[in-house]
Image (spheres, grey):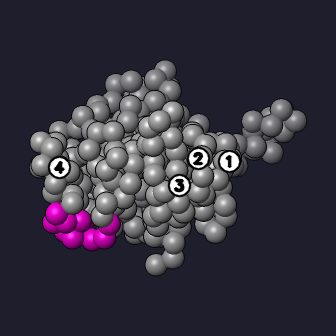
Amino acid sequence: MKTLLATEGLTKAFGGLVAVNRVSLEVRENSLTLLIGPNGSGKTTLLNLCTGVLKPDSGRVVFRDQDITGLEPHQIYELGFVRTFQIPMPFIALTVLDNVLGAMRSPGEDPFRAVTKAAWIEREEEHMERALAILEKVGLERHWNMPSASLGAAQLKMLEVARGLASGAKLIALDEPIGGVDPARAGDILTHLTELKKEGITFLVVEHRIDIAAPFADHMYALDRGSIISHGPPDSVLNDPKVIEVYIGRDEAC
């Protein structure tokens, strides 16, 4: 599989604390790459560096063979690399469908074309059909006309994924997509992600609940104190003595 995202020697320090220390990793197309590590290991900081939320002190980020190091988040988003946050942030006053439609660009937003309905109405109809199809893929088709504020935790996580799909994303980075979700619903979320991989979507997932997430991963990276301590197939990483020491030796919960 082709490499979709790569970091090379990525480093970020906050004062005397090196949060990400010369991290190099690869995310392959049509895969789910899982990033694990105890609290404070640098997982979210690494995600922020990849998506332009933070600027690295050194190293670089390459997405689809393009150096995106230092680009602004909206520029990276436009290239097809989208991220979600631990706490979903939908437009709570809008319906589920309108949240998805809001991620699509419409020619009707152009003030010079908006006055001529014929110039944009057909595209709007296409967007509506596509948005409904996306909601079906993430299991939200029955909730399309509900206010997003009425959704449960698992549904809000999938709404974030739906918005990413609506934007045309090729890679979606998810920060704890099953955090705060009961185990049964967590499995549903990961099953949906697995199905979306078959349609050409790639995922980079930061997650603490390793026991639930690991069986769905194609590749895993383990971080500790800002550095990669192990990577490879999930079973190999979870049985690595260095990883066991981090989680068990320090009384960290998986």
Q: Residue at x 17, y 49 (%)?
A: 247
Q: Residue at x 12, y 49 (%)?
A: 249
Percent coordinates x, y for residue 114 in the rendering:
80, 34
Residue hosting label 1: 71
Q: Earlier in the sequence, mark 1 or mark 3?
A: 3
- Residue nearest the observer in this picture, 205 or 122: 205
- Amino acid carrying mark 2 in the image: Pro
Instruction: Report the mark closest to the observer, 1 or 2.
Output: 2
Residue 11 appears left or right of 123: left
Q: Residue at x 38, y 36 (%)?
A: 86
- Amino acid carrying mark 1 in the image: Leu
Residue hosting label 3: 10
Q: Mark 4–mark 3 contact, CB under 8 Å?
A: no
Distance CA(mark 4)–CA(mark 2): 27 Å
- Residue nearest the observer in this picture, 181 or 44: 44
**Crowding at mark 4 (Cα within 10 Å: few <14, some 14-19, many 20+):** some
Which of the 4 quarters of the picture holds residue 59?
bottom right
Instruction: Report the mark closest to the observer, 1 or 4.
Output: 4
Query: How many numbered marks have been drawn onto this rendered protein structure?
Result: 4
Percent coordinates x, y for residue 227 in the rendering:
38, 54
